[in-house]
Image (cartoon, helix red, strand yellow):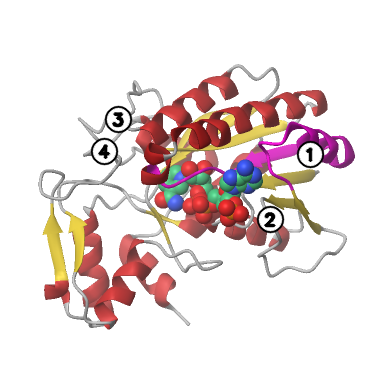
Amino acid sequence: MTILITGANGFLGHYLTAQLLKKGHTVVATGKGECRLPFGDNVHFQYISMDFCDPFVVHDVFKKIKPTVVVHAGAMSKPDDCEQQQWQAYLTNVEGTVTLLLNAEEQKSFFVFVSTDFVFDGLTGMYKEEDDRGPVNFYGKTKVEAEDAVQEYEYDWAIVRTVLVYGKPSSGRGNLLTVIKENLEKGEEYSVFNDQVRTPTFVEDLAAGIMAIIEKKATGIYHLSGEDILTPYEMSCKTADYLGLNKSLIRKVTAETFRQPAKRPAKTGFIIDKAKQELGYSPISFAEGLKKTFAD
Ligand SMILES: NC(=O)c1ccc[n+]([C@@H]2O[C@H](COP(=O)([O-])OP(=O)(O)OC[C@H]3O[C@@H](n4cnc5c(N)ncnc54)[C@H](OP(=O)(O)O)[C@@H]3O)[C@@H](O)[C@H]2O)c1
């Protein structure tokens, strides 16, 4: 079985590649530019530079690799960038997904698409897989369109939705916890929302859940997140407490008082019973995730 991953240089892509290799799977990691992964080419691993928005390149790669499984984790993943560069976001998140689906179809690959809690409107929170979607920003809209395309795929598919992913940074890009640490260590104030509710996801749990989907060939939609229900402000305070940093530098803000280019859904968070029952998914607590994020 050959597993092709898009966005392999990204936060999730890095951990997913590492876990699959550890279990002895054969991985073709793809990314936009040069390889930023720390694994050398060998019989189980190779890196190919593949801009998935380029249909000719994608076609060549798929013809050569003939992937059994495609995990599409690559995306324009920052909501504010998507809001400000909508054409680029559409090309990347929607058209790029369609290009991959068309090529996967030729190989009858199992297609696993990584989506987001931002497909929901955030009015109720604690969403189940079958709940109605209603994105409030352009990033969410592109993910809804891409999900729709995946659901029309002729062969087996799975959609994995996740929520605010954290953990030890892989290749540079930080996440809420590491950004808080950096700012507090410099003695700088940092503003975080206290009117958003999430179930933050430890990146290695997400990767393990996706690996279970691949190994069980589980199809359909799965919600993979943590179980602790927290606001980003609460996450930040817990981070400061754990690291012994000055949490009075953390400023509590709300959507009313702190504007961002892309509106955020207020309350998300997932019910993950389906993943627990069908995949044996078992995420760690936020307290444990904090320890692992900052372990040496
Ligand atoms: N992180 C979260 O909190 C979160 C929450 C919910 C859902 N998600 C979803 O989970 C998935 C993984 O997220 P992540 O945090 O790992 O994102 P990430 O770190 O931003 O990684 C995304 C990767 O996609 C690559 N990419 C973008 N456009 C590409 C293109 N045209 N061709 C090839 N590669 C391209 C980027 O390559 P470059 O680095 O070369 O630009 C980047 O490495 C994404 O689909 C995201 O929408 C993430």
Foreground disc of the pair 1, 3:
1
Compared with residue 103, is residue 269 higher up or lower down, i.e. above or below?
below
- The residue at which mark 4 appears reads as 263
Residues tagged 1 and 3 counted as in contact (Cβ below 8 A): no
Q: Is residue 84 magenta?
A: no
Amino acid on which disc 2 is placed: Gly
Q: Quadrant of residue 58?
A: top right
Which of the two discs, 1 and 4, labels the residue nearer the N terminus?
1
**Residue in view at x 48 percent, y 82 percent:** 296
Q: Secondary structure at mark 4?
A: loop
Which of the two discs, 2 and 1, labels the residue nearer the N terminus?
2
Which of the two discs, 4 and 3, labels the residue nearer the N terminus?
3
Q: Which mark is residue 57?
A: 1
- The residue at which mark 2 appears reads as 33
Residues tagged 4 and 3 counted as in contact (Cβ below 8 A): yes
Q: Which residues are magenta?
A: 50-79
- The residue at which mark 3 appears reads as 136
